[in-house]
Amino acid sequence: MHLQIITPEHVIFDAEVDAVTLPGKDGEFQLLNNHAPIVATLGQGTIKIKVHSQTFDKFNDESGKIYTAPANSQTLLFDIKGGTIEMNNNKILVLAN
């Protein structure tokens, strides 16, 4: 599935992923391939991105805001203050601040 994370300053992430864990307003939730369509609001927290090995090799964080999880080098982390998410047809769009 394809994930795109956009902030007012940058396109933070735009690549294929295996899973995404998001901080929802009412708790954390995870999106996997072929998830039902969803629109939700996000609270303050950390987006956890499990990337494909090919994506990880090619990934270049130009924003400087994404960091690697200490326990797993193929999990990327991005802290947000809030935002919205839409998933449809294996495409995830996160508008974060």
Image: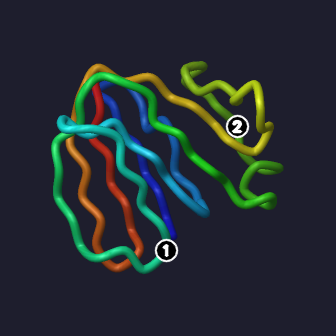
Rendered image: mark on residue 33: 1
Crowd rating for badge 2 (residues with CA inside 10 Å; few <14, some 14–19, many 20+): few
- Asked if the residue under mark 1 is in contact with the one under mark 2, i.e. CB atoms within 8 Å, the reply is no
- What amino acid type should be assigned to the residue bearing mark 1? Asn
Identify the residue at image location x=49%, y=74%: 33
Image quarter where the C terminus lies is top left
Q: Quadrant of residue 36?
A: bottom left
Helix, strand or loop at mark 1: loop
The type of residue carrying mark 2 is Asn
Looking at the rendered structure, the secondary structure element under dot 2 is loop
Could you say which quadrant of the image residue 37 lies in? bottom left
Determine the residue positioned at 75% across, 25% down: 70
Seen as rendered, the residue at the extreme front is 27
The residue lying toward the viewer, choosing from 70 and 3, is 70
Which residue is under mark 2?
A: 60
Neighbour class for label 1 at 10 Å: few (<14), some, many (≥20)?
some
Side of 35 where 3 appears, left or right: right
Q: Is residue 47 above or below residue 59?
A: above
Image x and y of residue 71, in percent: 77, 31
Which-is-in-front pick, marks 2 and 1?
A: 1
Percent position of residue 50, x then y: 63, 51
Q: Which mark is residue 69?
A: none
Query: Residue 11 location in percent, x, y?
Result: 43, 38
Locate residue 24 relative to residue 72 in the image: left or right: left
- Front-most of 61 and 74? 74
